[in-house]
Image (cartoon, rainbow, N blue to C red):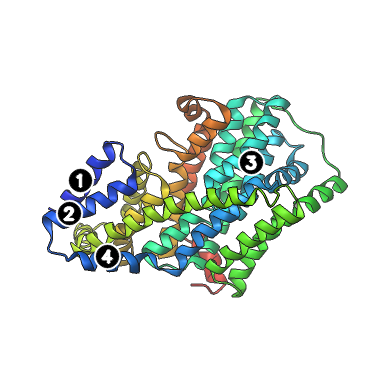
Amino acid sequence: MSAIVIFGVLLVLMLTGMPISISLGLTVLTFLFTMTQVPLESVALKLFSGIEKFEIMAIPFFILAGNFLTHGGVARRMIDFAASMVGHWYGGLALAGVMACALFAAVSGSSPATVVAIGSILLPGMIKAGFPMKFGAGVITTSGALGILIPPSIVMVMYSVATNTSVGALFMAGVIPGLILATMLGGITWYRAMKFDYPRQPKASWLERLRTFRKAVWGLMLIIVVMGGIYSGVFTPTEAAAMSAVYAFFVSVFVYKDLTLKDVPKVLLSSANMSAMLLYIITNAVMFSFILANENIPQLLTDWLIDKGLGQIAFLFAVNILLLMAGNFMEPSSIMLIFAPIVFPVAMKLGIDPVHLGILMTVNMEVGMCHPPVGLNLYVASGLTKMGITELTVAVWPWLLTMLVFLIGVTYWPTMSIWLPKALGMM
């Protein structure tokens, strides 16, 4: 009965168009005042203990690093390097877009930031070269989703906060699936470009490739700073996030000089705005999780599913359906913080690895970002291309289908996710 009331109130509030963070907070307060004897002091205590986790500090730092890189010319140099490597293949510029999104994802941690950074530079170039707008929009919208799968990833930090899973292990677990998905998206891009005979660029010489690599190397070094630092044990993931913010500032202002010191306060302010929004969602989601745990809802759900004899295969299928449906109405941070504490105990009882579950949930978030009505990447791409959401939805379907095929693979082949962190001794 408690579960029906909690989720019923949440659903009604969300259907009114209220922001998800406020919906969560009001649901908790309504339930507290009307249906429980929980003292408000314990809620306040839980609120502070829930958001004082060291890992949460990684989120504003990764957002700040991503903003410095988005405004600081790093994306343009990554695109030039990617175009010199694959531009001579069918659909060369589009393939360069996929490769550049994968590279930028490895330094930004955010999908919308990846779409903006790469799309705003690459799309005009693709149109000028003779590509249809729909093709370019489809490539960038879906490839931008790599931003939350290829580490570092803000969404993975959210999962870690919700389930106490190692952030370092999650980051390493995202490397191989991220590279496989980038390859699959590149494959469908190449196939469609070959089928419709889209333009190719002249083949770049090795000297030209070396020149573009030297220009991009300062941005690419950030991948080594973050991932190398975490794996070698020099930094925790949170310290790596802080280092990435400092490094991104240094590269953007003093090396590439695309940003001046006068521009820095503007970048800091936009990062603070985004961080505050996410931290407010986290705060309310922590309270929501506390109420669920206090009413014993995850435990009751676990017992009910196990009594029904639901095995790993059926459970993972059900999780995918649930998350894909949630992706229709909510953005990734909220989905992760609401659903992770619910499905996590069941997964543990069924013997599913927590890192594998984290990657599976992240891939679901990626798919959700690319389909309506709440797909964040669709809205960002719509702003860049001036295309309607319906038109964009039609444009992305070949790549979206590819992502769904990949989702099946990552769901039922856990080795893809957990092999690397196990090999590195991180789990």
Task: Tell me the mark number nearer the camera, choosing from 3 and 2.
Answer: 2
176 w.r.t. 46: above or below: above
Query: Could you say which is closer to the camera, residue 231 or residue 60?
Result: 60
> Does residue 298 show up?
no
- Secondary structure, mark 1, is helix
The residue pinned by badge 1 equals 9
Q: Is residue 226 left or right of residue 52?
A: right
* CA distance separating discs 4 and 1: 21 Å
Identify which amino acid the numbered label 4 is placed on: Ala
| Image: 210 above or below 294 | above
Left or right for 212, reference 97: right
Tell me the kind of residue under disc 3: Ile
The amino acid type, in three-letter code, at marker 1 is Val
Residue 117 location (% of width, % of height): 62, 42
User: Which labelled disc corresponds to residue 31?
Assistant: 2
How far from the left and from the top, in percent, is residue 130?
70, 24
Contact? badges 3 and 2 (CB < 8 Å): no
Which residue is under mark 4? Answer: 44
Q: Name the residue furthest front.
A: 262
Q: CA distance from mark 3 to mark 4?
A: 42 Å
Mark 2 and mark 4: Cα distance apart in space: 15 Å
Neighbour tally class for label 4: few under 14, some 14-19, many 20 plus, Cα within 10 Å? few
Amino acid type, callout 2: Phe
Residue 71 is situated, as x and y percent measured from the top left of the image, at 64, 46
Label 2: which secondary element: helix
Residue visible at 35% across and 54% down in the picture: 316
Tag shown at residue 425: none
Secondary element at tag 3: helix
Are the residues tagged 2 and 4 within 8 Å (C-beta)? no
Dot 2 or dot 4, earlier in sequence: 2
- Tell me, yes or no, if residue 58 can be seen here: yes
